[in-house]
Amino acid sequence: MMAQLLSLGLGRMKQPKVIAEVLGGILLGPTALGRIPGFTQHIFPSQSLPYLSLVANIGLCLFLFIVGLEIDASIIKRNARMSAIVSLAGMALPFGLGSALSVPLYHHFIDPSVQFTHFMLFTGVAYSITAFPVLCRILTELKLLDTTVGIVVLSAGVGNDVVGWTLLALSVALVNAGSGLTALWVLLTCVAFTMFLLFVVKRVMLWLARATGSTDNGPTMFYMTVVMILLWACAFFTDIVGVNAIFGAFLAGIIVPREGGLAIALTEKLEDMVSIIFLPLYFTLSGLNTNLGLLNNGITWAFTIAIACLAFLGKFGGCTIASRLSGFSWRESSTIGALMSCKGLVELIVLNVGLSAGILSPRVFSMFVLEALTLTFMTTPLVTALYPPERRVIATSGGAPPQTRDDECRDFDADKKSLVNEEQPWRHRFTVVLDRIEHMPCMMALTQLVRPPVPDFSSLTTAVSMSTASHPTPSKHKTPEVSISALRLIELSDRTSAVMKSSTADTLTHTDPLLGIFRMFGELNDLPVSTSLTIVPHDDLAHNVVDHAKRNASQLILLPWLPPCVGTAETSEGGTPRRDKFDHNPFETIFGTSRDRSTSAVHSQFVRGVFAQSETDVALFVDPGNQLNTGAGTGGSHHIFFPFFGGPDDRLALEFVVQLCANPKINATVVKMEKREIGNTQIERPPSVYSDIKADTNSLALLHQHGVTTSTMIGFPDTVYGQANTQMRMQSETADSIVWTRYAGRNLSDSDIPGPLRAALSRINFTSLASPVPLHAAIQRASMCQRVLVIAGRSKRLAVEDHRAELKDLVEEHRVVGHEVISKTIGDVATAFVVSGCASAMVVLQAAANVRME
C-alpha cells in the first residue's frame, strides 16, 4: 500500500516505480515510521524477520530471473561496435573512483575485521553497475528506444549488467572463500556451470519449447514446470557453491529461448505476483536495514555527498567522453552519460548482498542507499532537459540519421497543397491507426473507400479519354498513387513485459497479427502499405499518432471508433425522460473520473486528443451499431449522404465526398442545409415540435447577435464553438460559397474540367434544403436512402451554427441517454445521425489546424 500510494504522486513526476518502492521501504523502517514507539515491534516483530527474509529472497530470485529474460544478446551483437566503448568506459572510471573513495570510507566507518580488498571490491562494483530494468523503463517512457542514443544506451546497459553481475559474483566468492585458492575454485566452478547452461541446457530448452509448441502458442503447463524447476535448481547450485542464489536465477533467465516471444510470455505469467507482492517485501526488508538517522554529523554527510557526486561524475564523465570520441555530439553524449548513471534496484541488490555478508556497516549502507535513490531520481529530469524531443535523431536500419526527412516533408506539403487546392481534391497519403482487433473492419472499410478508382472501369475510362481527346490533361491532374502508412498502437502499461515488447518493436512489426492482417488486405486490394508499431503510455497515444502523421507527411489520418451504446431513458409517470439521479456524482469532479469507463468511452478520449492536437486532416469512421454495414464492399453501388452546413470541416467533407465519388461504384447526395423560418420549410413536422424549436433557435440567434458563445464545456479545447460574430460569419459564408460553387455550380459539359473530376461530379446530386430544424430535415432526407453512408463535418471549431438546442430536442424525442460522450467526440451533427439510427455507418471529418485557424 505504501509503494502504491507513493507511486501515484511520483508517477506524475515521470519517476520510475522503483523510486516509490525504495521510499516506501525506507519510510516503514527506522528512518520514519519506525521511530513511532511500538511500531516496529508490532508490525515487524523480530520473530517474523527470518520468514520475511525468506520470502523476500524467493521474490528476488524471481525478479532476477525476469531480469535475465529481459536481456537479449542480439541487442549487443547488433550494436557491439557503438556500445562496447561506452560500456567499458562506464565501468572502468566509476570502478576506479569507487576504489579510491573506499580508502577513507574504510578508515572512518568500517570495522577493521573486514578485509579492505573485499570492501574496495564491493564499493567499485556498486559504483560501476547500471540498473538495466529501470533504464529500460526510462527509455520507454521518454520514447528514446528508436533513437540512436536509446539504442546505444540499451546495448551498453545490457553489457554493463552482465559484467556487473559477474564482478559481484566474484566479490561474493572472494568473501565466502576462506582462501584465495578456494575463491579460484568457486569462480571456475561458476564459469563451468555457466558454460554448461549456455551451450547445453539452452539448446535443450529450445528443443523442448519447439516440441511442446510453446514457441507458437505460449508456454504450456509442462514447459512452465520445467522452467520453474530449472530456475530453482540453478539458484540452489550457485548458493551451495558459495556465490548467491540470485546469480543462478539470473542465468536461468538468460538461457530461456526468445523464439516466438516465449520470454515475454513467461514474463507476463510471473511479473504481477513479483512486482505487487515479492519486490515490495524485499524493499521493506531493505528499508528496515536503512536508517537515515545514522547520517547525524558533518563528516557523515560530507562522505554521503562525496559518494553521490563521485558516483555521478564517474558514470556521467566516462560515458560522455567515450560517446564523444565515438562520434556523437556533446548533447547526445551527455544524454548517454546521464542515462547510464541510473542506479535503481540493481545497486540496492548489490548493497544488500554486501550488508548480509557483513562487509558494509548499517551507516555506510544507508549512505549508499541515499546515493542510489538520488541518482535514480535525477535521471529522468536531467535527460528531458539535455535531450528534448525536437533534438532527437531517429535511428534507421542502417544506423544513419534521416537527414532528408524535413526536405521530404516540405516536398510532400507542397505536393499536398498543389493537389488539394487545384481542381482535383485528391488526397493520397494516409495514416491508418490500428489499435484493436474489433476496429479492423472499420479501418478496412474506410481504406477501401479512399482507394483510387480502378483504371479499367468503363465509365472512368470513357470520361478520361473524352477529356484527353479535346484537351490533354496536364500532369498535375493525374490521380496520384495512394500511399498508406499503418500505425499499430500498443499501450505501455506498468508491466515489465510491456517494456520488453517496446525494446523488440522491430520484431513485433513483422509478427503483430493486426499489422499482418492489414498487410494482406493491402496486397489483396493492390494498395501499398507500410507498417510501423509504437508502444507508448495511454496519455501519449494521441500525440504519437499526430507526430507519426507529420513525420510521414500524411494528408489524412484515418481513425476508427465504436461509440458507446446509447440507451433508452427511463420515463416518469408523465411520460418524460427521467434522468439517473447519480448523473452528477461530486466524487467524479474531485477525482476527475467518470462512471462510463467502457472501452468506447476511454477510446473516445484518445480520439478527441487526436482531434485537438492534429495538424493534419482527420477522418473518423464511426460504426454506430457495432455491426458494420458500410456499403464499402466490392459488389454493387453504394450511396453517400452529406449534409453541408458550412464551416472548414464541412468544406473538407465536401472535397472528401468528391474524391470518393471518383469510384464508379459510389454515388452521393449532397444537401446544402440552411436554417429558415417555418414558412419556408420543406419538411413536415408536428406543430408542437416546431414551436419549441423555433423558440430555442430564436433565443440562440439573439445570443449570437450579441457575440455570446453558448458552450461552456471545460476540458478539451476542441469542444468550444467559435464566437459567431459578423466577421466570422461573413468569412465562413464566403468560403462556403466558393467551395460550393466550385463543385455544385460546375457545368459538366465544360471542357476545362479534368476527366476524373467530371466523372466524380456526375455521380453527385447537389440540392439545397431550408428548414427551421435542419438536423431533423437532414435525418429525414437521409432516411429516404437505403444502405447509406453518412459523411459529416465535425464542426467543433469556427462553426457558423450551434445545433445544441435542436440536438437536445432530438435526444428527448428518441428518449436516449448517454449521448454526451458522442457529442463531445464527433460534434452535434454527427451525433444527431447516431442518435436517430438512420445511418449504417458514418465518416466524420475535421480540417487541419492551419485551416481551422483561417
Image (cartoon, rainbow, N blue to C red):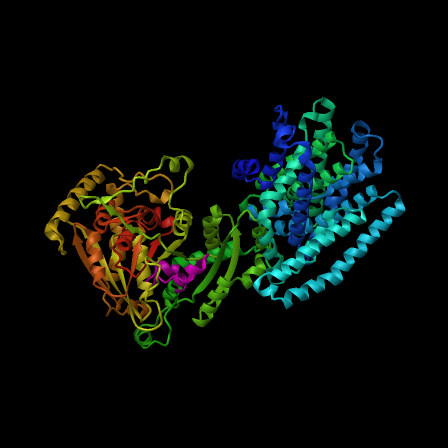
Residue at the extreme top: 297
Front residue of 255/852: it is 255
State left or right for residue 848 relative to residue 830: right
Q: Is 449 positioned to the left or the right of 672 in the image?
A: right
* Residue 59 picture location, percent across and down: 65, 45
**In the picture, residue 219 is in which quadrant?**
bottom right
- Compared with 86, 38 (above or below) is above
Q: Which stretch did the figure color magenta?
A: 418-444
Q: Count up the numbered dots.
A: 0
**Residue positioned 37% across, 46% down in the render:** 596
In this rendered view, identify the residue nearer to me: 87 or 573: 573
Q: Quadrant of residue 586?
A: top left
Residue 97 seen by the camera: no
Is residue 426 part of the magenta span, yes or no? yes
Residue 173 percent location from the top left of the image: 81, 45
Q: Is residue 687 visible?
A: yes
Q: Farthest residue toward the left?
A: 679
The answer to which of 49 and 797 lies nearer the viewer is: 49
State whether residue 552 is above or below residue 31. below
* Quarter of the figure that contains the N terminus: top right
Considering every residue shown, the one lying at the far front of the view is 47
Q: Is residue 149 left or right of residue 782?
A: right
**Image x and y of residue 438, in percent:** 42, 60
510 sits left or right of 45 in the view: left
Measured as percent of width and height from the top left, residue 769 is found at 18, 56
Residue 55: image quadrant is: top right
Is residue 315 highlighted in magenta? no
